[in-house]
Image (cartoon, grey):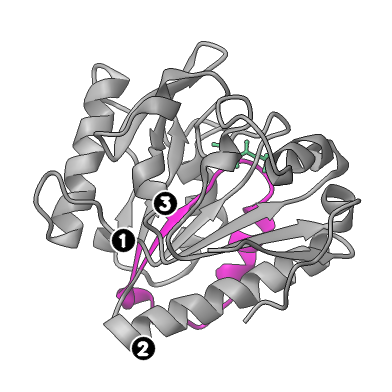
Amino acid sequence: MTPKVRIYPDRQALVAAALTAIVDRIRMAIDQRQSCTIALSGGSTPQPLYAALANTDLPWDRIRIFWGDERYVAPTAPDSNYGMTKRVWLDLVPIPAANIHPMPTDCERPELAASAYEAEILADFGLEAGSIPVFDIVLLGMGDDGHTASLFPHTAALSVADRLVTAGEKDGQPRLTFTFPLLNRSRSTIFLVAGASKQTALAEIFALQGDIAAYPSRGIQPEGELLWLLDAAAGAGMTVTSEIG
Ligand code: 6PG
């Protein structure tokens, strides 16, 4: 589906718009399918969004939360995506613990953790191995280098097509990440990108020609809707393509 791009004057407006977009899509999923499955991104950009979600009145028992990637560290580590989300959001709302699915980071090897998480996702969706679950919402960030989730440029994780979750790495540090086949099945994929440092990668990602290996976010071509929510600093030079429904 053609990406929809919206640009907001500053991070505060960006977070407010992202909050509305996500809450609307959570409510729509629950209205239509009695539950909502959402895969979260990590990093710093979504943190104020997660803090804002902690102040919303949602049917938390209908929401099942996963992560699209994770650093291979303990949940208590300062760079844990799960740890950050738990601290600013999930500990503050009455969501059943069974609805929260952090990526395991205590297996002997990241590859085993990736397989275990894949099995956990399939079990939660009630699907057999070989199926590809359809998440209602996938929230993504983008690095200055154009990576998304933990799909980094010129890494083996970009080519994994027979698994839903794989082990990746950034500068030798192990990561876990959804693969493109899983990411691209989502009903609604929302990129949240802020800051002037993202301009170059965004230009490469929206260029007519380009290399997914060099700019992995180009590989996010979901069957469902694709929204790019940018602040003016990141989106300088880009054009808004359509209103967000
Ligand atoms: C992670 C993220 C990663 C992140 C980008 C952008 O684990 O770091 O999932 O894909 O979204 O690196 O990070 P910032 O929001 O901090 O710029």
CB at disc 2 and ligand 1 closer than 8 Å: no
The dot on residue 31 is: 2
Amino acid identity at mark 1: Val
Q: Is residue 148 left or right of residue 209?
A: left
Queried whether the magenta region covers residue 42, the answer comes back as yes
- Residue found 63% across the figure and 77% down from its top: 20
Point out the frontmost of discs 2 and 3.
3
Residue 73 in sight in this render: no
> If you read the primary sequence from the N terminus, does the residue marked by circle 1 or circle 2 appear first?
2
Part of the protein shown in magenta:
37-64
Crowding near the residue tagged with mark 2, few <14, some 14–19, many ≥20 C-alpha atoms within 10 Å: few
Q: Is residue 170 left or right of residue 64?
A: right
Q: Where ligand 1 lies, by quadrant?
A: top right
In the rendered view, would you say 109 is above or below 71?
A: above
> Which quarter shows the C terminus?
bottom right
Q: Are marks 1 and 2 in contact (CB under 8 Å)?
A: no
> If you read the primary sequence from the N terminus, does the residue marked by circle 2 or circle 3 appear first?
2
> If you read the primary sequence from the N terminus, does the residue marked by circle 3 or circle 1 appear first?
1
Mark 1 sits on what residue?
134
Crowding near the residue tagged with mark 1, few <14, some 14–19, many ≥20 C-alpha atoms within 10 Å: some
Crowding near the residue tagged with mark 3, few <14, some 14–19, many ≥20 C-alpha atoms within 10 Å: many
Q: Are marks 3 and 1 in contact (CB under 8 Å)?
A: no
Queried whether the magenta region covers residue 54, the answer comes back as yes
Mark 3 sits on what residue?
184
Amino acid identity at mark 3: Asn
- Residue found 83% across the figure and 66% down from its top: 8
Amino acid identity at mark 2: Asp
- Residue found 11% across the figure and 45% down from its top: 129
The image position of residue 32, as x and y in percent, is 33, 86
Measured in 3D between alpha carbons, the distance from the residue under mark 1 to the one under mark 2, in whole angstroms, is 17 Å
Name, please, the residue furthest toward the front: 209
